[in-house]
Image: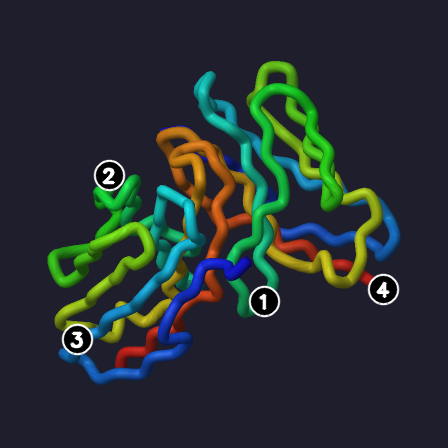
Amino acid sequence: DAKTTQPNSMESNEEEPVHLPCNHSTISGTDYIHWYRQLPSQGPEYVIHGLTSNVNNRMASLAIAEDRKSSTLILHRATLRDAAVYYCILRGNQFYFGTGTSLTVIP
Amino acid sequence: DAGVIQSPRHEVTEMGQEVTLRCKPISGHNSLFWYRQTMMRGLELLIYFNNNVPIDDSGMPEDRFSAKMPNASFSTLKIQPSEPRDSAVYFCASSLRGYTGELFFGEGSRLTVL
């Protein structure tokens, strides 16, 4: 089964960009790359998704490697409200969330 | 529009009791997922329904767990009998496009089994 690997934790200063990496070397051609985040005591929240091309929305940008074996979630200006656990998952025949990256934003 | 609605938000019960968790997906969504979250194991998919039919229940821990979706607007997850190791937060999520669509999660049901 295709799974993802993310760093356990990252820190960022407020107002600075954050790049959250995800490795998915066994991704299949039909798997969509999804990112979710989970704030304390809440359910996961959809952030962004893509298949092959880079994607932008009001929350973030998603950069997908040409071979699709890795991707990066980009928060352009981190705020304190962005402190959360960020999950990279593959949506196809797989719903594995993994342990995610806990992002700390330093004021 | 209302999001995914779960009830109860909190449940405390004693070992051996039956527990029923409920979920109302977003109207029009045709896929429903039950997840369990613990500190040790993170988020685990328990079961996935598409058009009210269970498609993948390989994550259901054992026969004590059962899930139903009698119609497009309601699903239940039942644990009978409950055990302390079932203590977790149970999330329901719905999606418009099965395997590929974005997931919308409810706020979760926190279960404590004493």
Q: Which chain's residue wears label 1?
A: A
Q: Is mark 1 on a helix, strand or loop?
A: loop
Q: Which residue is the site of mark 2? A: B55
Image-based side of B38 in relation to A14, left or right: left
The residue where tag 3 is placed is B18
Q: At numbered mark 3, what does the secondary structure look like: helix, strand or loop?
A: loop
Is A63 displayed left or right of B105 in the figure?
A: right
Q: Name the residue under label 4.
A: A107
Q: Where is residue A23 in the image (x, y as percent from the top left)?
A: 56, 31
Given contact means CB atoms under 8 Å apart, are the residues at marks 1 and 2 in contact? no
* Identity of the residue furthest to the right in this view: A15
Both labels 3 and 2 in a single chain: yes
Q: Determine which residue is flagged by label 1.
A: A40
Q: Which chain carries label 4?
A: A
Please say whether residue A8 is visible from this viewpoint.
Answer: no
Disc 2 is attached to a residue of which chain?
B
